[in-house]
Amino acid sequence: GLADYLSAVNKNTAMTVAAVFRCVTLLSESVANLPVQVMRKAGAIYKEDTTDQLAYLLNVQPDYTTSAYDFWCRAVANILLDGNAYIVPVRDPANYEITRLVLCDSTAVAHDTIVDTYTVTDITNGVTGTYQEGDIIHLKGFTFDGKNGVSVLTFARRTLAIANTSERETLNRFSSGGVVRGIVSNPRDPVVG
């Protein structure tokens, strides 16, 4: 029933609801189309620095596996569906320059808010280790404590459960051609007029 579905609502089941899929897609694609500027202080003002390696990583290809557009789409989707997105800047050991920006799977990151560390075990992206708060980029959705983002699914769980149940019922109705069959009876004798 509804109670079972409430406990089963997660980002995968939520994305099967057309309205959720469209909202997440619209928001993530809109943000992914925006430019990200690296600004450097020049005297008393800031100017955009398009020659910096970080500008390339943020706007063209943050990682050898993905484009900037796909990277930002996934980051925004993670914020909406998980409440958090975690980006690990990978540095060249020789010169400490950032060579990659790795968007980690949210389930591969444990955030210890007491000692302000992040333990990352993202085998898929080749990133593991314990990071200090200043060594990881943590993008949060709505937050109650300033440390952990809260997914919009947390707030929309009941609505999503009802929408999914309604969608399932509609599919069942129309699978038989939309024809509802039944017997109509009248317990009283018909009145002849």
Image (cartoon, rainbow, N blue to C red):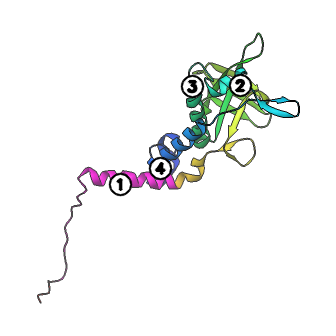
How far apart are the two marked residues, 1 and 4, measured between alpha carbons?
A: 17 Å
Q: Position of residue 111 (x, y in %)?
A: 71, 34
Secondary structure of the residue carrying tag 3 is: loop
Which quadrant of the rendered structure holds the N terminus?
bottom left
The amino acid on which the numbered mark 1 sits, given as a three-letter code, is: Glu
Q: Nearer the viewer, mark 1 or mark 4?
A: 4
Secondary structure of the residue carrying tag 4 is: helix
Mark with earlier residue (2, 4):
4
Secondary structure of the residue carrying tag 1 is: helix
Residue positioned most to the right? 43
Q: On the image, numbered disc 4 is attached to which residue?
A: 19
Does the segment drawn in magenta span residue 31?
Answer: no
How far apart are the two marked residues, 4 and 3, measured between alpha carbons?
A: 26 Å
In this picture, which residue range is highlighted in magenta?
159-188
Q: Nearer the viewer, mark 1 or mark 2?
A: 2
The amino acid on which the numbered mark 3 sits, given as a three-letter code, is: Ser
How far apart are the two marked residues, 3 and 2, measured between alpha carbons?
A: 17 Å
Secondary structure of the residue carrying tag 2 is: loop
Q: On the image, numbered disc 1 is attached to which residue?
A: 169
Mark with earlier residue (4, 3):
4
How far apart are the two marked residues, 2 and 4, measured between alpha carbons?
A: 38 Å
The amino acid on which the numbered mark 4 sits, given as a three-letter code, is: Ala
Mark with earlier residue (1, 4):
4
Mark with earlier residue (1, 2):
2
Mark 1, Cα crowd under 10 Å, few <14 / some 14-19 / many 20+, is few
Q: On the image, numbered disc 3 is attached to which residue?
A: 67
Q: Position of residue 175 (x, y in %)?
A: 26, 50
User: Which quarter of the picture shows residue 127?
Assistant: top right
